Image: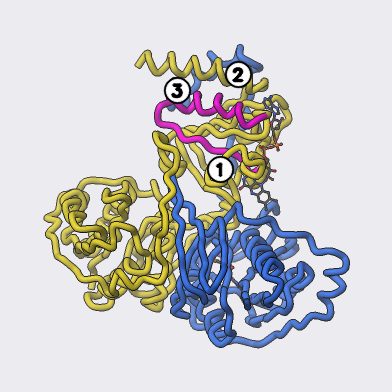
Chain colours: A blue, B yellow
Amino acid sequence: MKIAVCIKRVPDMESRFRITGDGKSVDEAGLKFDMSDFDGYAVEVALQMTEKLGQGEVVVVSLGPDAVQEALRKALSMGVARAIHLKTDRVPVDGFAIATALAAELRSGGYDLIMFGKHAMDSMNGVVGAMTAELLGLPNVNSVSKLEVAGGKGTARRELEGGAEILEFPLPAVVTIDEGIARPRYPSLKGIMAAKKKPLESKPVQLIAPRLEPTRTELPPERQGGRIIGEGVAAVPDLIRLLQTEAKVL
Amino acid sequence: MPNVLAFAETRGGDLRKVALESVTAARKLADTQGGEVHAMLVGAPGIGARADQLGRHGADVVLVLEHPALAQHSAEVAAATVAARVKASGYDAVIFSASAQGKDLAPRVAAKLGVPMGSDVLAFQRTGGGIEVKHAGYASKVIHTLMLTASPAVLSVRPGAIPPAESPKSGRVEAVQAAMDPGSAKVVVKEMVPGRAGRPDLGEAPVIVSGGRGLRAAENFRLVEELADAFGNAAVGCTRAVADDGWRPQSDQIGQTGRTVSPRLYIAVGISGAIQHLAGMRTAKTIVAVNRDKEAPIFKVADYGIVGDALEVVPVLTAAVREAKKGH
Ligand SMILES: Cc1cc2nc3c(=O)[nH]c(=O)nc-3n(C[C@H](O)[C@H](O)[C@H](O)COP(=O)(O)OP(=O)(O)OC[C@H]3O[C@@H](n4cnc5c(N)ncnc54)[C@H](O)[C@@H]3O)c2cc1C
Ligand SMILES: Nc1ncnc2c1ncn2[C@@H]1O[C@H](COP(=O)(O)O)[C@@H](O)[C@H]1O
């Protein structure tokens, strides 16, 4: 069982974000970074799968500048066997450009399963996984909240609005991982030491010309909340009145 | 070619509301340059009967693909057929809803066409250089304006962002063939797991009553359910803490790693208001919070806060809402 997990390095979403001088993007200088949440779940799912099978290899792939090696190292310290850094000078906003580069790397890797996050926490797009699957011509299931693999076949649960579906598919396949499936383990000290000796291959890649580019990025106005109308059940009549007359939602 | 193609989403043989939203969105885009709207409708034999509703919302042509195997949605067949149609007929834009189904289909279609896409778009506008879209990023803490210069422009539009509007057009039905044998799809739906009946989806509900660990025990969610029932049109949400504890299904989770919602009214009961929870609900029109701790961060975003024990306040609130509803 050979599994690839594509991980993106993103800023800590608890940060207070600022906009760059040109008004186009988020200023990422000085922020803390980590692998994107759902990507961490995907790494955990992959590790658990190979641990359960008692065989197999998990490989992580990340595209971006040298700084993404930090996220790759973290995955190595969680237990991943090796890492591939697709080196570019920036991470494009255009998800198709990312997918094209990832697909070119993954095509000849002989992977049984290729995993992605449902979406990256910064882009919030949810497109790179499915696009990569298409480019590779592989079966694809997105937003998976349960996953089992046995005998060359996979079974996945996917949440829908008001319900879910259970899908079956042959391997090799591409899945994107949703909430509820696993929480990433913390790297152990031993894992961190071991990671230093694990292979991390860095190779330059050429991106196709972007056709989706930011022209402006804004911070939405802060909510004007903070009004406590009272304490306990005594405040209920006031709340009803405000919902009727002021908010007009009742 | 100035025509716009909209994907008309169905479930269980019926159009979903987002199908009408997609057609409405396509109409807006087509009207800016005098193009037609074509809607793609896929399902079991008989689904074509839904075409008139799409016509009423602005579809000039309804492309109907009927096949017995398509009683069950197949993303593979739908994506292949939409992409084949776009390649054969040429469209200026292809519109999906950013629903579960649309988010799954749109990037497949875009990749088959070799183009990027605007995902989960809040608003869009045609400009000289292409199509400009608004999109929330960074855990919904920023709003990006992005320029999409690829042709065709593939978009998935946030449910609720473009409410369905009538704009009667002929809705002429044209039968189309599947671009692949529906029986040969590699991914097959083995089972549909129904949700709880009688409640709107979190993404569509005008009112959401949401509970956190402050409810103390799974069985106390009954109070939240009853408050939702009193509103009549409310959905029930929860925090990750509660979903992790198994009190509620993960699909009810609202926040950074759960659903993103913008109802008219969001009532947070026993929820601390962690930044990851706020990421999913801060765009609600009105926020009410009930929390025992007056320092809880949820009060910083709440329009109306009540400091108190949820187990005492919620039943009284439920009775008062019932009473207020009766008065209407
Ligand atoms: C990467 C990551 C992603 C996350 N994603 C999400 C997400 O998508 N959604 C999400 O919700 N969380 C998410 N979290 C978790 C989040 O940080 C919080 O831990 C969680 O939201 C807390 O849930 P809570 O408010 O139910 O519980 P607590 O934080 O424990 O709050 C309980 C509240 O109830 C109040 N209370 C107690 N008793 C009563 C009573 N009797 N009556 C009234 N009030 C009472 C308390 O004062 C307290 O404010 C994420 C965390 C991480 C690290
Ligand atoms: N630069 C990148 N390097 C590696 N994987 C990526 C990159 N960008 C996105 N991904 C993967 O694609 C998923 C979806 O990203 P997105 O479509 O941007 O929401 C992420 O969760 C990652 O698994």
Can you give x and y, in whole percent of width and height, for residue B295 in the image?
Answer: 73, 30
Question: Depth-wise, is mark 1 or mark 2 nearer the camera?
Answer: 1
The residue under the point 52% across, 34% down is: B266
Q: Which residues are magenta?
A: B217-240
Q: Is mark 2 within 8 Å of ligand 1?
A: yes
Q: Specify which label sits upstream in the sequence, 1 or 2.
A: 1
Given residues B5 and A133, the one toward you in this image is: A133
Are discs 1 and 3 both within one chain?
yes
- Report the chain holding disc 1: B
Q: Residues within 10 Å of mark 1 (few under 14, many from 20)?
A: some
- Kind of element beneath mark 3: helix
- Kind of element beneath mark 1: loop
Task: Tell me, yes or no, whether the two marked residues, 1 and 2, touch with CB atoms within 8 Å.
Answer: no
Q: Amino acid at mark 1?
A: Pro
- Report the chain holding disc 3: B
For label 3, the residue is B230
Q: Is mark 3 within 8 Å of ligand 1?
A: no
Can you give x and y, in whole percent of width and height, for residue B55 in the image?
Answer: 17, 53
Q: Amino acid at mark 2?
A: Val
Mark 1 and mark 2: Cα distance apart in space: 24 Å
For label 1, the residue is B249
Is residue B219 magenta-colored? yes
Q: Viewed as shown, does residue B105 lie left or right of B44?
A: right
The residue under the point 65% across, 63% down is: A45
- Kind of element beneath mark 2: helix
Q: Quadrant of residue A76?
A: bottom right
For label 2, the residue is B313
Q: Main secondary structure of the magenta part?
A: helix
Q: Quadrant of residue A221?
A: top right
